[in-house]
Amino acid sequence: MLNREWTESYIARARKEFENFEADICEYDGLTVINWKNRDGSGNWAVRYILDGCRLIVTGDIGNAIFRRAEPYTLEYCGKMIIDPGYSARKCVAKEHDTSLYTWDRASVKRDLDEFFQYVTEDEGYSAEEVEDIEDIKADLLETCGFNGVYIDAYMYERLPDWVDDISTLQECGMQYSLHFIAWLVGLQMIAEQQVNNVLYGPKLELEVTSGKKLVAEINPDPSYKELFVYLEDGQGRSVQDIAVIGEKYSYDETGSDSQNIIPHPGKYVARVYGDANDECYTDCFEIGEYVPEEGWCF
């Protein structure tokens, strides 16, 4: 039976594996193609998601599968699939392996079998012979457990007590979501989070420099400030050094210093430069006026 702690551990593992991943999203002939891969160029754990209307196609280093539902797969919806893995799993119409969605292990199977038959005891009115038979059945069921779970053939079915009218519960003993299935869903969740952050923090322009880092220019997410942040970013996508803040000059009125009290100065610009690599504060501030051509002059 599905164990939430097991699932949570897989979610944590997937987030760890994906912590340096970045989504490359493009639209192609009605399809949304998302390449989810490590920034260092490694193909380990790389996944390609294809959103094709009511189909979600997953391919890559950790397996392949196709999901289908009545409504279109949007990125917003895909980012929430991890909330209900069971529903997502039921929408899988094709998979590479029997273990692509679920996995089993003997310890979990034994635990669930013990729980299923927990009331078959002499204290509950069962005879010693009946209790012994159940112990034998549990041992035999445990031996049938493989990658596809507990196997119940016709002979085993005949041995089960009459009150076992639904063998699906027994067949699901020890069943857990597979790591790769959870990773597919976590990848989609992290991609959706990245897109929200891209909107929140504004578009970025990146230039790889010879040191292996990236020179990045990013728009201030607060629209009240008309300025760009320029900084260095390492291979992990982290800002490691401020270079400059360039934008329209502004000041604050007397009532406070929040964004609602910003007074812009049209035609005037400011460049605050971080001239000391060891200082977190800017060292120089340059005010630049907007060039106004002389009357009658044309370019």
Image: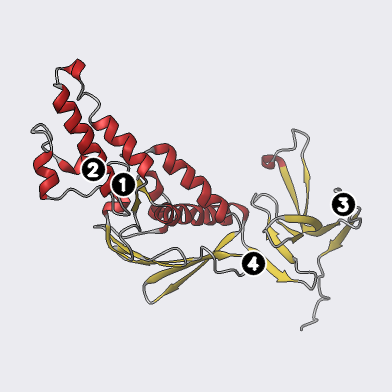
Q: Earlier in the sequence, mark 4 or mark 3?
A: 4
**Frontmost residue, 40 versus 81:** 40
Q: How many marks?
A: 4
Which three-letter amino acid code belongs to the residue tagged 4?
Asp
Mark in front: 4 vs 3 = 4
Task: Tell me the number on the disc at residue 140.
Answer: 2
Name the residue nearer the viewer: 169 or 15: 169
| Residue 40 numbered mark, or none | 4
Answer above or below: position of 276 versus 212.
above
Q: Amino acid at mark 3?
A: Tyr
Which residue is most to the bottom?
A: 299
* Res 285 → quadrant: bottom right
Q: Considering only order in the chain, which callout, 4 or 2, is on the residue closer to the N terminus?
A: 4
Which mark, residue 86? Answer: 1
Distance of mark 4 from mark 1, alpha carbons?
33 Å
Q: Amino acid at mark 1?
A: Gly
**Eye-nearest disc, 1 or 3:** 1
Which residue in the structure is indicated by mark 3? 282
Between circles 2 and 1, the one closer to the viewer is 2
Residue drawn at x 37%, y 66% as measured from the top left:
64
